[in-house]
Image (tube, coloured by chain):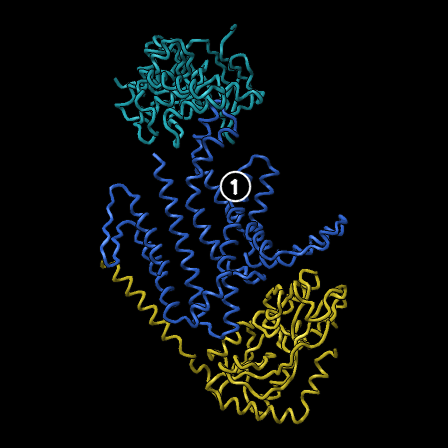
Amino acid sequence: MKRLLWVLLAVVVIVVVVVLLQGRGGQTGNETGKIRVATDATWAPFEYIETNTTEIIGFDIDLFDAIAERADLDVEYENVPWDSLLAGMATGTYDAAISSISIRPDRAASMNFSHPYFTAGQIITTLKSNTDITGNETLSGESIGVQIGTTGDILARSINGTNVVGYEVIGDAFTALRFNQIDAVICDNPVAYGYVAKYNTLKTVGEVMSSEQYGIAVARGKEELLDKINTALDALLAEGIIDQLTEKWLVPP
Amino acid sequence: MVLGSTLLDFVMEEQNKGPGRELSFVVGGEVNIRQDPWWWLVVAVAAIIGLLVILWPVPFRDIVVFARDGVLVTVLVTIASYFLMVIVGLLGGLGRISRNKFIFGISSLYVEVVRGIPLLVQLIGWYFVSPVIIQKLGLWLNLQSLVEYRANPIITAIVAITICYGAYMSEIVRSGIQSVPRGQMEAARSLGMSHFQAMRHVVLPQAFRVILPPMGNEFVSLLKDSSLVSVVAVADLTRRGREFMAAHFNPIETWLMVALLYLIMTIIAARVVSYIEKRSKYERY
Amino acid sequence: MAGPIIQIKDVRKRFGRVEALRGVSLDVNEGEVVVIVGPSGSGKTTLLRCINRLEEYEEGTIVVDGMTLDNTNNINAIRSEVGMVFQSFNLFAHLTALQNLVLAQRTVRKRSREEAEKVARALLAKVGIPEKAKAHPAQLSGGQQQRVAIARALAMNPKIMLFDEPTSALDPEMIKEVLDVMTSLAKEGMTMVVVSHEMGFARAAADRVIFMDEGLIIEQATPQEFFENPREERTRLFLSKILHL
């Protein structure tokens, strides 16, 4: 009898703790000090790690550096796996994130987004030797590689009859594709073009299948930071920074 | 609460197996469990999971439903790897005590190398390397089926785990065999039995009893380590957790439930293991 | 058969740097009971274990029942003719007494289960513990275990029985029951080579007593000569230490 009571007590305590933890995360870091900016640096050419210096570089990084300079922010980038990144934004672990994040209502429910700064869409990549796949109607029954938790992942699963293979990083999906372990990869078109340019056995197929806008995510409760970012971003956009960065980083389709 | 009462039934049955043990079932749901207190833990964890799912279906029920097939994959990978690992371990262990220099050398090399590389690294290595090797082999042997080989991530993962854990199992088997007193082998040989007969009838049966507890621990260990396959495109429980978290942005609830699911699996496995251990002891003198 | 059933000639054996046997020669005739005595480290156990090749010697020859021990192909055949009883019994712990006796009969002599069990039960009765057939070794006393061990060796119908200090690990009150079995075995005409400290047994049952020291046979004689009139100085020294009457 006594033992049963102890067990029940333990159960109650644990459940209560869980309920209390359901609140959204607190304030980590402060507004005026260094801000933690998360990014999944496995997404060339937007954010990736430079081989020699092991620094994070890319389109998004240049953009945020420019914003930081304009808004007088002290930035610390953190390389975070994609699935943890969005979750970390929701719990306030990071102050902001720039990582080719497509603005979506379900995401906007848990975090703030800056004004959009780029438009991209999902596209299919296959081996040049693959003649079966010509567009998203021909994907049924094929195996498709994606990075877990991305809009590409969501899109691939929405297509009937596909076998979606989730990868840690999009690079692994392309490697698998190159070694003919999967039939196709679905991801954002700028990334796809980069891989196609790098490996001459790959090609993109069909039309861009969606229209998504990238935004900078900012944790809830950091509205002042959001305003600073937006002000700087708007100014930079007006000055044509996207064209400059596009020319520097992106491969034409 | 069907799960709960089935659990209670099982526990009651357990208790009834002891000699002269009476079970007092009091109306009101109390079961008097005198023997193994650890079964309480199983009940407690199951109760927590049940409560969370019922009281807060969003997100806990969603997580459980989403992760359902991940649990199956975890169990499949664990059981398949374990079964194969035991076979590899037996061969490796025998190889490690072999008087044949070549066999001894190969098995020792295998054990040393594999034990020196983390399981995660081996998993990732196998995952990327095995298709390439097989394709190259196909080109070399001119077998088109090999050239077009598509690796099944689950099978690749099982192979990697088998090879890795097999090395540890080899050492367990080896020390189990070596723990059998030399006199046993001497007595058997002095009766005219061959080395093989002595091993089969005298040494290995006794070694088995020594090996059994560590074998049980390896199973529980394997169950937990199976979470590493989430890194190599296998949709196990951990991977399902990550996917859920990526889509719903609620790491705390997600990981709590995933942890509880792993916990209930490992505790049940641990109980089964200790039950088997006790059982094998009854057979002894 | 012609000639001694055991012929040991100039056997040398070393363990690393230590020479355990330094040129030992010994003949044992069929039906003879030979008891080997000596201080520890004298090589007597090593010599015994050479006879059924549990130890391998470097020089010399040993011929057992006409078969030379150098050719290891027939070692299992030789061993089934030579039974051994160990100081620490070495009963198969996971089997019952009956199963201990039956195992080698079935695997080596290829006897049927019924035949083997029949032989086993008779032997257990002969050594005085037929009721313990279903007991595991851990449930038996030391004396009972050793008797089962003797029965186990006898179940193979060996021509020779080797005893390696069979009573040294026993409590004093159990020594007699084992020695009694050995004595009756000797009376039945079994060829026995016994390494032991039990001088009473040597006096009563041995045809010959052999004294070894430092890897060599120092003296051999009938029990009467050995105990009452030892020739060598070293034998006398040893006996004076051992016999406290």
Q: Secondary structure at mark 1?
A: helix
Q: Position of residue A145 (x, y in %)?
A: 64, 66
Identity of the amino acid at label 1?
Leu
Q: Nearer the viewer, residue C206 or B237?
A: B237
State the hue of chain C: cyan
Q: Position of residue A207 (x, y in %)?
A: 71, 76
* Chain identifier, colour blue: B
Q: Is residue A205 visible?
A: yes
Residue beneath the point at 52% across and 72% down: B246
Q: Nearer the viewer, residue B150 or C103?
A: B150
Q: Nearer the viewer, residue A253 or C215?
A: A253
Q: Which residue is mark 1?
A: B90
For disc 1, the chain is B
Q: Is residue A7 above or below residue A106?
A: above
Residue beneath the point at 55% across and 19% down: C69
Q: Is residue C62 above or below residue C138?
A: above
The number of callouts visible is: 1
Residue beneath the point at 49% across and 64% down: B67
Q: Position of residue B161 (x, y in %)?
A: 55, 53
Tell me: A177 left or right of A113: right
Residue found at the far top of this picture? C2
Report which quarter residue B265 is drawn in.
bottom left
